[in-house]
Amino acid sequence: GQSLEQPSEVTAVEGAIVQINCTYQTSGFYGLSWYQQHDGGAPTFLSYNALDGLEETGRFSSFLSRSDSYGYLLLQELQMKDSASYFCALGGAGTALIFGKGTTLSVSS
Amino acid sequence: NAGVTQTPKFRVLKTGQSMTLLCAQDMNHEYMYWYRQDPGMGLRLIHYSVGEGTTAKGEVPDGYNVSRLKKQNFLLGLESAAPSQTSVYFCASRAGVSTGELFFGEGSRLTVL
């Protein structure tokens, strides 16, 4: 099967940089995705790593290392609106997409 | 462009009742998914479909059935609702396995009394 582990909570201040880690176990997969979800809303797509390395999208970057079964989401220049839950998701064999339990990010002023 | 639409948005059921959640997407996506979300549990995959006429079980399929008779629609059925099925249900679609981007509906909040 597949499983993902990520911290349950992270706190930071406005303007700071925060990294949310995701470790996984799988027998083979297509890539690692990241999603953001605000309270009461639907998850929205942030980033996708199909290959090892760093993907940058504005203030957000995502990294994947297949050899370490590890990835992270990096959020820079944090803003209050970044307070949300962040999920990593594994695209596995058979095209099922499995999610981690999520990390709640709280940004304070 | 509507994207992914779920109906109904809210529903209250009594234990033992049945109901169907409808998911419709207008992006011509091959892959569609049903997830449930409970506090502290993240998103758990119930069933998914890789194309019209196909379905497959996810992580938590018991108590649910699905059908994909048309490419744009993915139905989730509860034959005999139980309080443990109280949850927020999200439908999502994806163009293909080469992209990690899921497009989500707004969610359907189901309460089983």
Image (cartoon, coloured by chain):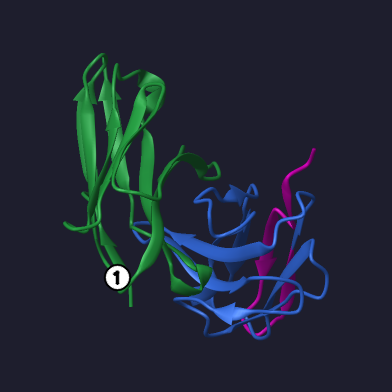
Chain colours: A green, B blue
Q: Pinpoint residue A27: horizontal percent, then vertical percent.
A: 30, 74
Residue under the point 49% across and 51% down: B100
Chain letter of mark 1 equals A
Vertical comparison of B35 with B83: above or below: above
| Looking at the image, residue B52 lies above or below residue B101 | below
The structure residue drawn at horizontal position 35% and vertical position 18%, both measured from the top left corner, is A79
Number of marks present in the image shown: 1
Q: Quadrant of the N terminus of chain A?
A: bottom left
Identify the residue position indicated by label 1 in the image.
A26
Residue B88: in magenta span: no
Q: Can residue A92 be seen by looking at this rendering?
A: yes
Q: Quadrant of the C terminus of chain A?
A: top left
Between A92 and A42, the residue placed more toward the observer is A92
Magenta range is B1-22
- Amino acid identity at mark 1: Thr
Side (left or right) of A50 relative to A22: right
- Viewer-proximal residue among B11 and A41: A41
Describe residue B103's horizontal placement relative to residue A102 as left or right: right
Residue A95: percent from left, percent from top: 52, 68
| Residue A98: quarter of image | bottom left
Give coordinates of residue A38: x percent, y percent: 46, 37
